[in-house]
Image (cartoon, rainbow, N blue to C red):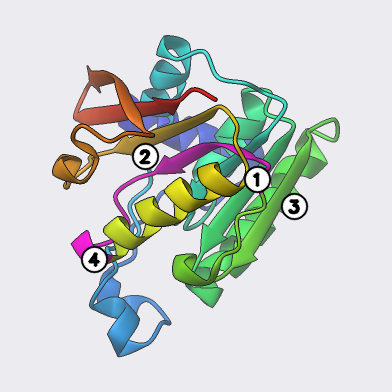
Amino acid sequence: MSVYDDYVFDKRYQLDTRSEVAINDLDISQEDKQHADKYKPTRARYFRKIMEKVVLPRDGVFADVGCGKGRILLLAAEQGFDQVVGLEISPALCQIAERNVETFKEARPKTGSIKVVCTNILDYQMDGSETVFFLYSPFDHPVTKAFLEMIRQSLNDHPRDLWLIIDEFRFPELLEDDELLKQSIVYEYGSAIFHVYRHHR
């Protein structure tokens, strides 16, 4: 049923988000490939279920880290987030995501802002507007650790409420007893396991 939901979502809006892309097929450097994972989008049904479980602010920036072809960007916009940003290192995937965004917005012209930023996550400058970060475990341990430190620094520089949602978190020990990002829930649905963390200002 979840696979069918993905098909229906792509078919409804004439999108290309379903097919996976292997690491070796990504147009990124060999060094970056050592730290990356293949493109594999969170299933639409799974994302909608976690959105039902967690009450999130809709007026800040929802950032999908490692957005790939942009499925979660579009689902987040569908959920009513005013500002959605996708961060992706692969130029080819960014182009596909941008096409998907354009097609989606043609079908839903009242959709809020959706932007795709082609960047290495470690080069991204957080400006304090981000209130939700979503990840489907796109990095290895060292990059995940560095990214979490970026979030901590951003919270120190720009105090705010913030949510972190990670699908298939491979390194939960990185946030064990964390002073800033407290685990809220672990939610299992289908084959997905979402780890949800929250920071209260």
x, y percentage for residue 23? 28, 72
Left or right side of 170 for 31 = right
Q: Which mark is residue 142?
A: 4
The outermost residue toward the right is: 109
114 up-or-down from 91: above or below: above
Measured Cα–Cα span from mark 1 to mark 3? 26 Å
Say whether disc 1 or disc 2 marks the residue closer to the N-terminus. 2
Say whether disc 3 or disc 2 marks the residue closer to the N-terminus. 2
Residue type beneath disc 4: Pro
Q: Which mark is residue 102?
A: 3
Measured Cα–Cα span from mark 1 to mark 2? 26 Å
x, y percentage for residue 90? 48, 73
Measured Cα–Cα span from mark 3 to mark 4? 34 Å
Q: Which residue is mark 1?
A: 128
Q: Which mark is residue 42?
A: 2
Residue type beneath disc 2: Thr
Residue drawn at 56 percent across, 38 percent down: 11
Closest to the camera, between mark 1 and mark 2, is 1
Say whether disc 3 or disc 4 marks the residue closer to the N-terminus. 3
Q: Which mark is residue 111?
A: none
Closest to the camera, between mark 2 and mark 4, is 4
